[in-house]
């Protein structure tokens, strides 16, 4: 049987594992796709609202990249593939 301290340690380890498993779907700037197309892609693929998609698009344009979504690898992989299929530059990073 676990005491209170052992329970707290296990809860802390579980939380750390969840945080460590978070990944970021990063979208990169390119000289090919229009702002409108990138915004539309973020709305359709990542389920961003229009304002969020616009903000991410401007960050991508001016900073060169933007983490557009966070989650597990399992959650982000299909989104990354969908963005790549649309001709955008994206990757999943730790």
Image (cartoon, helix red, strand yellow):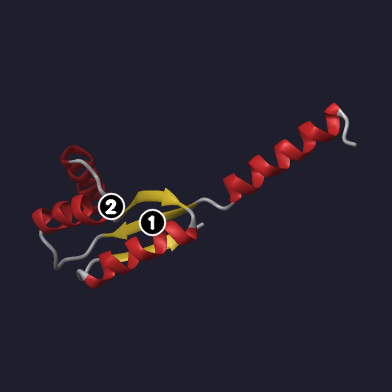
Q: How many numbered discs, if any?
A: 2
User: To which residue does mark 2 refer?
Assistant: 46
Give coordinates of residue 84: x percent, y percent.
27, 70
**Hey, which quadrant is residue 38 in on the image?**
bottom left
Q: Is residue 9 above or below residue 64?
A: above
Give coordinates of residue 2: x percent, y percent.
87, 35
Asked if one can make out residue 83 in the rendered structure from this viewpoint, the answer is: yes
Q: Residues within 10 Å of mark 1 (few under 14, many from 20)?
A: many
Q: Is residue 75 left or right of residue 94?
A: left
Which residue, as the protein is rendered here, is positioned at the far top? 4
Q: Is residue 42 above or below residue 15?
A: below
Please state which of residues 93 and 60 is positioned toward the viewer in this rendering: 93
The reply to whether discs 2 and 1 touch (Cβ–Cβ < 8 Å) is yes
Give coordinates of residue 82: x percent, y percent.
27, 66
Residue shown at 84% from the left, 35% from the top: 6
Q: Is residue 53 left or right of residue 37?
A: right
Residue shown at 25% from the left, 57% from the top: 45
Residue shown at 68% from the left, 43% from the top: 14
Please state which of residues 3 and 87 is positioned toward the viewer in this rendering: 3
Identify the disc placed on residue 25: 1
Please state which of residues 22 and 11 is positioned toward the viewer in this rendering: 11
Identify the disc placed on residue 59: none
Residue shown at 14% from the left, 68% from the top: 32
Give coordinates of residue 18: x percent, y percent.
59, 46
Q: Residues within 10 Å of mark 2 (few under 14, many from 20)?
A: some
Element assignment for label 2: helix
Which quadrant of the rendered structure holds the N terminus?
top right
**Hey, which quadrant is residue 29 in on the image?**
bottom left
Element assignment for label 1: strand
């Amino acid at each position: 049987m676990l005491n209170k301290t052992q329970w707290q340690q296990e809860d802390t380890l579980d939380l750390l594992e969840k945080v460590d498993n978070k990944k970021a779907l990063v979208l990169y700037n390119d000289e090919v796709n229009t702002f409108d197309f990138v915004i539309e892609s973020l709305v359709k693929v990542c389920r961003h609202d229009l304002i969020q998609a616009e903000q991410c698009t401007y960050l991508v344009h001016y900073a060169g990249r933007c983490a557009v979504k966070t989650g597990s690898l399992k959650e982000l992989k299909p989104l990354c593939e969908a963005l790549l299929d649309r001709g955008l530059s994206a990757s999943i990073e730790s």
